[in-house]
Image (cartoon, rainbow, N blue to C red):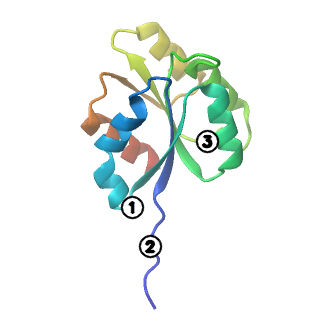
Amino acid sequence: MSAAVAAPAMILAVDDEADFELLIRQRFRRQARAGEFAFRFAHHGEEALAVLAEEPDIELLLLDINMPVMDGLKLVSLVRQNAQLKSIPIIIITTEGAEEDRERGLALGANAYISKPIQSSHLIKTISELLAV
């Protein structure tokens, strides 16, 4: 009998910037190949809510604050109000120096924040720590 292989951690990355998906795929290709992480992508909060409704296996949210349609702060608030989603770890992405947005995101229930430009090692460490809980 072979040992069960753990499924990769499903991460929903939400950002409206065109190059964000490519950046995440490049920086996490080693972890994706190793079966550690798998990513889904959305471009704003409403799209993220639709993905969360369709894919209950999402284990972590990585989201930008400044997006059209629905920003990241509103999304954090809605996720924390949803009984099925309220315990999902959330990492918000803030612009360097956006202390007010960062503090508001954490107050709304985000677990951590990452400043842009994103440092891969810091993001990987933060994701790993939140998924180990």
Measured Cα–Cα span from mark 2 to mark 3: 24 Å
Mark number displayed over residue 87: 3
Residue 80 visible, this orientation: yes
Mark number displayed over residue 35: 1
Residue at 73% x, 36% y is 82
SS for dot 3? loop
The percent coordinates of residue 12 (x first, y second) are 53, 41
Residue at 61% x, 41% y is 87
Kind of residue sitting beneath label 2: Val
The percent coordinates of residue 121 (x first, y second) are 25, 38
Between discs 1 and 2, the one toward the N terminus: 2
Measured Cα–Cα span from mark 3 to mark 1: 23 Å
Kind of residue sitting beneath label 3: Ser
* Horizontal side, residue 100 vs residue 58: left or right: left
Count of labels shown? 3
The residue that mark 2 highlights is 5
